[in-house]
Image (tube, grey):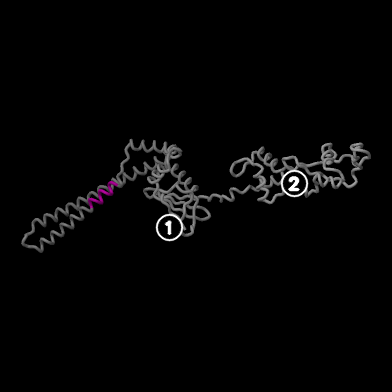
Amino acid sequence: MSIRYNVAYQQLVPTYVCQEASVRRAEKVCQSVPGRVVDEAISDLLLDLMQPMTLQVAIAVQQEVEARVSETDSLRRKHVERAQYEAELARRRFMKVDPENRLVADTLEAEWNNKLSSLAEAQEQYERQTQKQRMLIDAQTREQLLSLAADFPRVWNDPAVEPRERKRILRLLIEDVTLINGEMIQVHVRLRGGATRSLTLAKPLPIAQIRKTKPEVVAEIDALLDRYCDREVADVLNRQGRRTWQDEPFNLKKIAHIRHAFNLKCLYSRLRAKGLLTAKEMSVRHGVTTTTINLWAREGRLKKHRYDNVRRCLYEPLEHGAILKGQGGRRAKQPTFTFAQAG
């Protein structure tokens, strides 16, 4: 099924819809074509058509056509002259007839009228063909056309030019455009004068697919989450020059959204899956306070892993009985670790 749109509406809407759509009959749109892709292709086609070399070839072809038209002009002119002769001959016959002989006079008058009608038709056709085909291009006009071709890309791409003016240019060059919607967009352009151009355009990706994070980026985020929290992952990607689909830098919220969208575990969940414990769990395990656990971590007796940007940590557990508590008052004797290094 094809869609035909008038170039008067070009560059006004992002999507061309079928004429049988909801605009007229309040029904569901049967098909649509992304307008931006078509607009860009038509613009490129116009720029190609308006190149000086293209115009020179067109002018040369036009001049060759005019040379051949001049050869047939004499034949059309002779046809007019013959019609004039026959009309004049019919007039003379009518003028010489006896008025009393009404039957013959009426017949000759009808013949004269027919000849005059044929003459008028021949003259009109001759003038129409002459005006249509004999469009002589002098040297001054040729230079103006070539200069216009040189300036056309600048004028067409000028942001100050309003869409209304571009539509007027299109009306002068393009008759209509037919779109055939399928796996690829088939564009058939009919130019003024009857020439045609056909284009095959790829459809743009759906916005949902454009916004979807690339698989390689997801894989890299998954690998970074083994060592970094969301904010740190965003910082690493930004240092590598990575950007989102909107060409923006990553941040904490974007990384969290990607994690939820692709079911990626955060650093905290990964550390917990490895068996790491909180300070409270460590204190219960070894029979000390959380303050002692934090002290041992600062002294390097316990190995801790930070899992967010506010410096909250999880700890690698020790074996039961790995710590021998001292005797006496507070801090009278530091506990002894039965292994060489806890961390």
Residue 133 shows in this picture: yes
Mark 1 surroundings: few (<14), some (14-19) or many (≥20) residues within 10 A: few
Closer to the camera, 85 or 146?
A: 146
Q: Amino acid at mark 1?
A: Arg
Nearer the camera: disc 1 or disc 2: 2
Q: Is residue 300 magenta?
A: no
The picture places residue 207, in percent across and down from the top left corner, at 56, 50
Give the main secondary structure, helix, strand or loop, of the magenta stretch.
helix
Give the structural element (helix, strand or loop) at label 2: helix
Q: Which residue is farthest front?
A: 329
Q: Position of residue 107 (x, y in %)?
A: 13, 62
Which numbered circle lies on residue 24?
1
Tag 2 residue: 268
Q: Position of residue 76 (x, y in %)?
A: 25, 50
Residue at 69%, 39% (x, y): give it: 236
Q: Secondary structure at mark 1?
A: helix
Of 295 and 96, nearer the camera is 295
Indicate left or right for 215 with 271 as reference.
left
Q: Give the quadrant of residue 220.
A: top right
Q: Quadrant of the C terminus?
A: top right
Q: Magenta residues, as a range?
A: 122-131
Question: Which of marks 2 and 1 precedes in the sequence?
Answer: 1
Q: In the image as oriented, which residue stretches furthest toward the bottom? A: 103
For the residues labelled 1 and 2, the Cα–Cα distance comes to 57 Å
What amino acid type is highlighted by mark number 2? Tyr
Residue 91 vs residue 156, the one in the foreground? 156
User: Is there any visible trace of residue 75 in the rendered image?
Assistant: no
Using residue 126 as the reference point, say whether residue 88 is left or right of it: left
Q: Nearer the viewer, residue 338 or 313?
A: 313
Q: Residue at x 48, y 49 (%)?
A: 14
Asked which quadrant contains residue 287, the reply is: top right
